[in-house]
Image: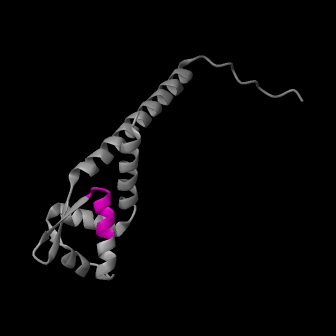
Amino acid sequence: MVVDVGDDERIDRVFRALADATRRDIVARVLRSEQSVSVLASEYAMSFAAVQKHVAVLERASLVRKRRSGREQLVSGEVEALQRAARLLDGYEELWRGRVDRIADLLAEEGRQPTAEPRRGSAR
């Protein structure tokens, strides 16, 4: 699985952003519907500034997009970054499923091969 350095940096930003439960919740909310930063801030037991910082981290990771509408900053979800992360994880899943299948095949093959009879009693 070959990924260029630019992709590595982008995907690292996505996973760092998603490592926080509040940011994951913000992404889930704005994927359902566009919301203002004020509305988002009212949903959490933290300051408006703290929510703004979370949104900024998500925006740098391309997980959300902000736009101005009058005095409000509206936040909407961006699926492309999530899809990129999902493709990467799918690749790892495929890799590990293949390895597990090969191990299972080896174990099954080993089980079919005749083995030497265990010795009865040991000479000490």
* Relative depth, front residue between 52 and 106: 52
Q: For the point 32% across and 82% down, which residue is it?
A: 45
Q: Is residue 15 shown to the viewer in this render?
A: yes
Q: For the point 38% across and 55% down, which residue is it?
A: 13
- Quick one: which residue is furthest to the top in this view? 114
Dominant SS type (magenta) = helix
**Residue 92 higher or lower than 68, as above or below:** above
**Residue 6 higher or lower than 69, as above or below:** above
Tell me residue 82's x, y (percent): 27, 51
Assess whether residue 60 is covered by the magenta stretch: yes
**Residue 105 higher or lower than 5, as above or below:** above
Q: How many marks on residues?
A: 0
**Image quarter in which the C terminus is found:** top right
- 78 relative to 97 in the view: left or right: left
**Residue 31 higher or lower than 71, as above or below:** above
Q: For the point 25% across and 63% down, which residue is it?
A: 27
Residue 114 occupies quadrant: top right
* Relative depth, front residue between 118 and 55: 55
Tell me residue 94's x, y (percent): 37, 35
Tell me residue 109's x, y (percent): 52, 21
* Relative depth, front residue between 34 and 59: 59
Which span is picked out in magenta? 54-63
- Quick one: which residue is furthest to the left in this view? 70
Tell me residue 9's x, y (percent): 40, 49
- 61 relative to 113 in the view: left or right: left
Q: For the point 21% across and 52% down, which residue is it?
A: 79
Q: Is residue 1 shown to the viewer in this render?
A: no
